[in-house]
Image (tube, rainbow, N blue to C red):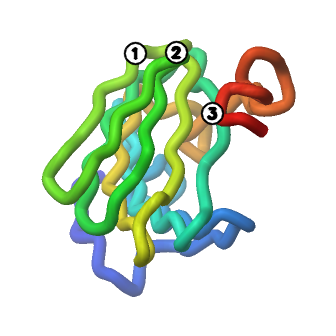
Amino acid sequence: MSRFVLSDDVGLERFDWGEVGWRCIPALTGALQLAVLDVTLTQGGGHAFHTHPDQEEMIIVKAGRIEQWIERESQLLGPGDSVYIDAGVVHASFNVGQEDALLQVVLAPSVGEGGYELVDVSGEEPWRSLRGG
């Protein structure tokens, strides 16, 4: 169902590392092929190592600076930079700047009513020790 999504329509969910604004998910828009999220990583926060087994992902940095990981490789990204991640690839995003990092995230295809699937691997090796922690 095509529709306008106004800022008041975006459902916010808070986590210990920041928040997600659910902008385009099946429950909100009926989208079957994509999920769009507004992600805020608080200063010093991060979305630890995880994978989306059946979803490709594009992360676009809108503000702030992040340390973006794809498997065992990292890159600092700032406003206007982005990263594409294949389905099933382990990745993580950490805010290394002095302000909140604002990200636009697109996943496809949409999965389930929430539009999003995640498998946390941050407690497993080598991911647990990769950043020295």
Q: Are marks 2 and 1 in contact (CB under 8 Å)?
A: yes
**x 24%, y 54%: residue:** 78
Mark nearer the N terminus (1 vs 3): 1
Mark nearer the N terminus (3 vs 2): 2
Residue 8 x/y as whole percent: 40, 86
Q: Which residue is mark 2?
A: 89
Furthest residue toward right = 123
Instruction: Kindly report the distance in space between the C-alpha atoms of the residues bearing marks 1 and 3.
Output: 14 Å
**x 72%, y 24%: residue:** 127
Judge from the rendering whether residue 106 lies leftward or rightward of residue 12; answer left or right: left
Quadrant assignment, res 13: bottom right
Of the 4 image quadrants, the one containing the C terminus is top right
Q: Secondary structure at mark 3?
A: loop
**122 or 57, which is in the foreground?**
122
Q: Are marks 1 and 3 in contact (CB under 8 Å)?
A: no
Q: Which residue is mark 1?
A: 86
